[in-house]
Amino acid sequence: MFRFKRDTAGDLVAFTLLLIGALCMIGPFVWMMSTSLKPLAEQYDMRMIPQTVTVENYPRLFEIIPFHLLLWNSAKIAAISTFGQLLTCSMAGFIFAVVRFPFRNVIFVILLITLMVPGQITAIPQFIIFKFLGLYGTQAPLYAPAFLGGAFGTFLMRQYFLTLPIELAEAARIDGASLARIFFTIYLPLAKPALAAFAIFAFMFSWNDLFNALIYLPSNMEKTTLTVGLALFQTQYSGQWPLMMAASLISVAPIIIVFFLAQRHFIAGISMSGLK
Amino acid sequence: MGALRPMGIERWWVLVFLTPTLIGLLLGTFGSIFATLGISFMDWDLLTPPTAAGISNYQGLPDDRLFMRSLWNTLAFAGLYVPLTVIISLFVALGLNRTIPGVSFFRVAFFLPTVSSPTAVGLLWTWIYAQDNGVLNEMITAMGGDPVRWLSRSVALYSVVIVNVWGAIGGGMIIFLAGLQAIPKDYYEVAEMDGAKSWQRLWFITLPALAPSMFFQCVLVTINAFQAFDYIYILTRTGNGNSTMPTLVFSIYRNGFRFFRMGDAAAQAVVLTCMIMVLTLIYFRLQKKWGAQA
């Protein structure tokens, strides 16, 4: 067998540089955690390992602000959005992959082009529509658009459905199954890996969204999401870093945990969206 | 491609399945683009009926100090953020494509900022950058230097670029890694047999083969650069609701959704979209030129 000559010096340089880079990536998170475990009086003690370790900041967070409501609002909006995206994008992805109909490719390409349209240009008319519908200040504008499909998810699901043999659909059709039945009983159950990858993304986008929550929801802690809550917290409790870091850590933790558990899906999702 | 031809009632199912997407396309995207264009020629505060304003919203832009600062900041931000993100993530991917220990650890580490909420991580960075007792300034003063006002008007651009690049390397790395893994191994074997040195393999095989990833990544990062908002909002917002480094999206947010000056906000959104479109077209032209040479 042919084998590469190992470029040992190059590997060593690459490893060292990557290690420095990785520390720059992780360092801030370690600092976030370490600060959240310090008592307020010792917040300016710059040691990485706190002199006094305390978890008091976490229960305090829930006492001074309705933090549980922020978590609940964000989770609820993200869950509904994710459901809407999974349903409508997989439906469209299925049709684009399995059915032939007039203008199919044209519509699909137009859909992909919309990936380049910046959100700000749709935000203004959308805002006006929701305002005139009387939904300004409610959570509906944050999840309703998720039920109108989207280029990213449709593309992802279509790519996955294309990998399934078309004979699956053809055979079921001969047996008299409707398209809806083929989709719900055959294609959707087979698409679990792609659905999982996409669900993580959809949930993350919604959970991390600041802009829409900022423009639609009232700036009070009972009604808004975690992201806006953190921004409000930033002004109301400025200078109380251990509390703020505890709040930050709780908001990044769910996504990071899911990311660790489903790393493979996550990265597959990104590379699928990337090329081919 | 073997695909089903719908017959009879199946045509209705096709329509039903596509309806959400079609509504999203027609009303959500294309309707919105035309609506925004229309609104940009009006004055509208959402309380009184809109009035025709001609091109005055556009004519007013050069005199709008927030807009002009935002425009400059956005261009400067993109000018630093795009090349830095693309180059650093390319190098990270090239490093991770080698046979070195701990590849999966590195991948997770670089990806961590990408999945974390920019709002939450932004709070952390406000502390790192804080003027009094901030982490960076503590380090600097401990080494005998003078504290820096990291988030002040003159420095904020660089501080914000650093955080945004930090948060974007992971995504870029994954796209380049996918591109690298798609390069056939025998290219390298042949090159090695012909005695190509490692820099020659990089220059003549790896980089040309990565051109599609590079193109895709440049388009993506540029679009993101012009839409950057979260970190900027958290890091540079001042007490009176302004920013020490306003960008176009910040200006649109403030005009449209804080002051309800829909006409002005729409005009600025149109300018923003045109800039993104022009840059994307330039990338497409460049890619064609490159593709023709290869």
Image (cartoon, coloured by chain):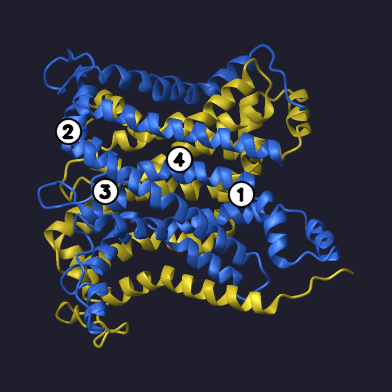
Chain colours: A yellow, B blue
The answer to whether the residue labelled 4 contacts the one labelled 1, judged by CB atoms less than 8 Å apart, is no
Q: Is residue A67 visible?
A: yes
Distance of mark 2 from mark 1, alpha carbons? 50 Å
Name the residue at the bottom extreme.
Answer: A51
Distance of mark 4 from mark 2, alpha carbons? 42 Å
The vertical placement of A265 against B195, above or below, is: above
Q: Chain of mark 4?
A: A
Distance of mark 3 from mark 2, alpha carbons? 32 Å
Is label 3 or label 4 in front?
Answer: 3
For the residue marked with disc 3, what is the amino acid?
Thr
Q: Is residue A216 visible?
A: no
Q: Which residue is mark 2?
A: B64
* Residue under disc 1 on the same chain as residue under disc 3: yes
- Dot label at residue A83: 4
The vertical placement of A175 against A40, above or below, is: above
Q: The residue tagged with tag 1: helix, strand or loop? A: helix
Q: Chain of mark 3?
A: A
The vertical placement of A34 against B235, above or below, is: below
Pointer 4 local density, CA inside 10 Å: few below 14, some 14–19, many at least 20: some
For the residue marked with disc 1, what is the amino acid?
Pro
Distance of mark 4 from mark 1, alpha carbons? 16 Å
